[in-house]
Image (cartoon, rainbow, N blue to C red):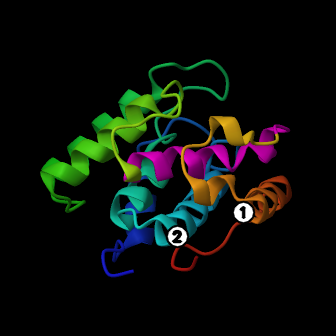
Amino acid sequence: MANSIANYGDLIHAIMARGFLSHHGIHGTGHWMRVRRNGLLLAEAEGANSRVIELFAVFHDSQRHNDNHDPEHGKRGAALAFEFRQQGLIDVSDAEFAELEEACCDHTNGGNAPASLSVAVCWDADRLDLGRVGITPDPKYLCTEAAKDFDMLNWAYEQSVARLTRSYGHV
């Protein structure tokens, strides 16, 4: 993965220092790592930009005020990503940032017709982790063929239900 984030662990710690929720909750770092893993697998299968997916994984739910109804959390996550970009903590092109911003802002209500493949993969990576809250992902709400694949759906669901996490540096 040539465009993978180099200091991902440092980035996660910086984001966690700015977060609102418990990092161990349903939208915490375990979820972020499963979204990252799902996204990188989907990115490889679909040819999406892994840099956008990795950044989405850690920013999309990072600024939630609660685990329930919080319709502005994605926009707050995108705003934090913008701030980190301005400070030089993340290095992305304008096009990559536009995809990250769309992915974060619209991941809750974006449907299944995003503007780009990378955004589609971000949304699918997140939706494949719904097992953690007792929901089986429905292929009709997924955007990519790789996410709709029976084996991928089952594997991701099992990972989500088990709430497995991995170290920051490994997929």
Say which amino acid is labelled 2: Ala
**Residue at image mark 2:** 45
Could you tell me residue 31's position as x and y percent?
64, 52
> Would residue 113 appear left or right of 124 to someone viewing this image?
left
Residue at image coords 22%, 43%: 83
> Would residue 128 appear left or right of 106 to someone viewing this image?
right
Residue 42 in sight here: yes
Crowd rating for badge 1 (residues with CA inside 10 Å; few <14, some 14–19, many 20+): some
Whether residue 167 is situated above or below residue 63 in the rendered picture: below
- Residue 152 got which mark? 1
Segment tinted magenta in the rendering: 118-135
Residue at image coords 16%, 59%: 88
Q: Quadrant of the N terminus?
A: bottom left
Residue at image coords 43%, 50%: 56
Crowd rating for badge 2 (residues with CA inside 10 Å; few <14, some 14–19, many 20+): few
Image quadrant assignment for residue 166: bottom right
* Magenta span dominant secondary structure: helix
